[in-house]
Image: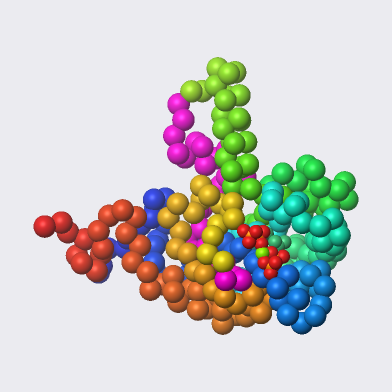
Amino acid sequence: MAKEKKGPEGVPAASGIPRHIAIIMDGNGRWAQRQGLPRSAGHSAGAETLRRVADHCRELDVRYLTVYAFSTENWKRPADEVGALMKLLERNLIIELQKMERDGFQMRFFGDTGVLSPRLQELIAASHQLSDRIDGYQINVCLNYGGRDEIVRAARRWADTVRNGEENNLDEETFSGLLWTAGVPDPELLIRSGGETRLSNFLLWQCAYSEFYFTDTLWPDFTDETIDRAIAYYRSRDRRFGGLSAAGGGQSR
Ligand code: IPE
Ligand code: IPE
Ligand code: MG
């Protein structure tokens, strides 16, 4: 039997379904504008898409789904769009809170949520409390999230540890444990909808060895088949992690 290739964390690679999928859900605004609708209508449609996609990933046995909902840079948008997005998040979180325990899924939030409205912060705290009691499929919503911000915060926390004389031996694993994603394995697959081929400050540390799937499909138009195509692409990749291809025997000459 062929020896299974392992990723940096001993995760089975390039076989089957990714354990963790990350998605940059982009293209809501363009989707709405193409239909003569306000951008906020695109965000509402995008929220419905997330429900469908999350269900499909769960059916496929994906264990973690991490989605980019609002970046540290998205505050640059007009106040009415930001306001509409925050209201939408609030409404949807209230709905999901009713379902988490019944359906057995966790919902966690990564990012600087301390600056959000008190109501949203309350809902996020409730969601984390519930998630602590649930041992199932985990959806992570990145909200006021920036990859650089996450890394700088982790570095500050590390500096505090050193200053307090608690520890001074930093390695990659310890640093990973200081990020918002602590305890969550790195995504094997990163998907971006909406045609852009950039990271826009998403999961900079965690995507070191992820496979990237970019598609022009706008987020509200995403279907189960789009996810299936992304996974088929992932499965076709030869994940070498800096080593040699297993297909070539993995042997040096
Ligand atoms: C992604 O869609 C959602 C957020 C960034 C909140 P966009 O709103 O960026 O949609 P486009 O890229 O303008 O079409
Ligand atoms: C990335 O999309 C952020 C989210 C999807 C939440 P943006 O639309 O903000 O990214 P840029 O501006 O095209 O890089
Ligand atoms: Mg965009």
Residue sitting at the far left: 253
Quadrant (top left, top right, bottom left, bottom right) of the N terminus:
bottom left
Q: From this viewpoint, is residue 231 visible?
A: yes
Q: How many marks?
A: 0
Q: From this viewpoint, is residue 139 visible?
A: no
Q: Is residue 24 left or right of residue 41?
A: left
Ligand 3 picture quarter: bottom right
- Name the residue rendered at 56%, 29% in the picture: 158
- Tell me if residue 151 comes above or below residue 243 in the rendering: above
Quadrant (top left, top right, bottom left, bottom right) of the C terminus:
bottom left
- Name the residue rendered at 21%, 61% in the picture: 250
Our reading of the magenta stretch's main secondary structure is loop
- Name the residue rendered at 84%, 52% in the picture: 120
Q: Where are the magenta residues, as a range? A: 169-195
- Tell me if residue 15 comes above or below residue 11 in the rendering: below
Residue 161 placed where, x, y %?
Answer: 58, 24
Residue 78 placed where, x, y %?
Answer: 81, 57
Residue 225 placed where, x, y %?
Answer: 56, 82
Residue 160 placed where, x, y %?
Answer: 61, 24
The front one of 3 and 133 is 3
The front one of 190 and 171 is 190
Q: Is residue 231 magenta?
A: no
- Tell me if residue 65 comes above or below residue 117 in the rendering: below
Q: Is residue 160 left or right of residue 11?
A: right
Within the image, what quadrant is residue 74 found in? Answer: bottom right
Within the image, what quadrant is residue 3 found in? Answer: bottom left
Q: Is residue 199 left or right of residue 143?
A: left
- Name the residue rendered at 70%, 73% in the picture: 30
Q: Is residue 186 magenta?
A: yes
